Image (cartoon, rainbow, N blue to C red):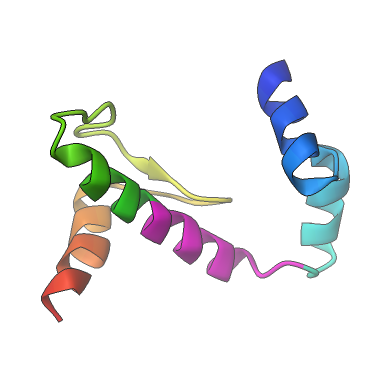
Amino acid sequence: MHLARELFKKVTGLNVKDFELLCSLGVFNSSLMNDAIFKFKRYEDSSLSYTGIDKHAGKDVGGWDAVIRRKEYEERFYNQQLR
């Protein structure tokens, strides 16, 4: 966890506690952040699938402050490609 906190600080310029405070004050829209994270994961999964890498097969998918079941994630985000 220590390494993740250091990376977070380096990437955002904020420590996790300050970032959580900003979120609680409504500076960041958690719904939009979750949506962006889930969409990023969809593209990441599809870009790795050709290599046979799927470290998270069958596992629930975490966003910023939400976790959705794998089945819902696949229905919601993989089926978007069909539209």
- The structure residue drawn at horizontal position 30% and vertical position 54%, both measured from the top left corner, is 42
| Residue 13 location (% of width, % of height) | 84, 45
User: Most extreme residue toward the bottom, as rendered?
Assistant: 83
| Residue 73 location (% of width, % of height) | 27, 55
- The structure residue drawn at horizontal position 66% and vertical position 26%, both measured from the top left corner, is 4
Q: Does 68 appear above or below 54?
A: below
User: Does residue 1 appear anywhere in the picture?
Assistant: no
Observer-nearest residue: 39 or 69? Answer: 39
Q: What predominant SS class does the magenta segment belong to? A: helix
- The structure residue drawn at horizontal position 77% and vertical position 47%, both measured from the top left corner, is 12
Observer-nearest residue: 35 or 69? Answer: 35
Please provide the residue range marked out in magenta: 28-40
* Magenta stretch encompasses residue 48: no
Q: Does 47 appear above or below 38?
A: above
The quadrant where residue 15 appears: top right
The quadrant where residue 78 appears: bottom left
**In-image side of 79 versus 36 (left or right):** left
